[in-house]
């Protein structure tokens, strides 16, 4: 299984701010929800949530709008490594 990307548009403004209802840096939401206690300790993230970081909290949206759970996508990510 493979893929290729021929064109990729990077909107710089979306990297530094999000509109209400949007999220960026999805992997950070997934990590914070999906890591086990050992991983949380390893990365010094004990007692932190997405609400504690500027880049993940500025839109005020912490759940995905499509109903997919961040913990599930984190498990898929880990399985793919």
Image (spheres, rainbow, N blue to C red):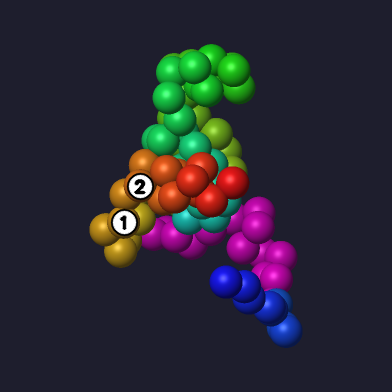
User: Taken as a whole, is the magenta stretch helix, strand or loop?
Assistant: loop
Quarter of image, res 53? top right
Highlighted magenta segment, given as a residue range: 9-22
Work out whether residue 56 can be spotted. no
- Callout 2 environment at 10 Å: few (<14), some (14 to 19), or many (20+)? few
Work out whether residue 4 can be spotted. yes
Check disc 1 and report the residue beneath it.
68
Label 2 close to label 1 by CB (< 8 Å): yes
Q: Element at badge 1? A: loop
**Mark number, residue 72:** 2
Q: Is residue 6 left or right of residue 74?
A: right
Q: Compared to 45, does 70 lie above or below?
A: below
Counting from the top left corner in percent of width and height, residue 7 is at 72, 83
Asked whether residue 17 is drawn in magenta, I would say yes
Q: How many marks?
A: 2
Q: Please tell me which residue lies in front, 35 or 18.
A: 35
- Nearer the observer, disc 2 or disc 1? 2
Q: How far separated are the C-alphas under marks 2 and 1?
A: 7 Å
Counting from the top left corner in percent of width and height, residue 10 is at 70, 71
Counting from the top left corner in percent of width and height, residue 8 is at 70, 77
Q: Is residue 53 left or right of residue 10?
A: left
């Amino acid at each position: 299984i493979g893929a290729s990307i021929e064109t990729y548009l990077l909107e710089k403004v979306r990297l530094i701010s999000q509109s209400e209802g949007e999220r960026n840096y999805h992997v950070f939401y997934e990590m914070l929800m999906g890591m086990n206690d050992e991983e949380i300790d390893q990365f010094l993230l004990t007692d932190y949530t997405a609400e504690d970081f500027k880049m993940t909290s500025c839109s005020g949206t912490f759940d995905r709008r499509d109903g997919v759970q961040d913990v599930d996508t984190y498990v898929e990510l880990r399985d793919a490594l």
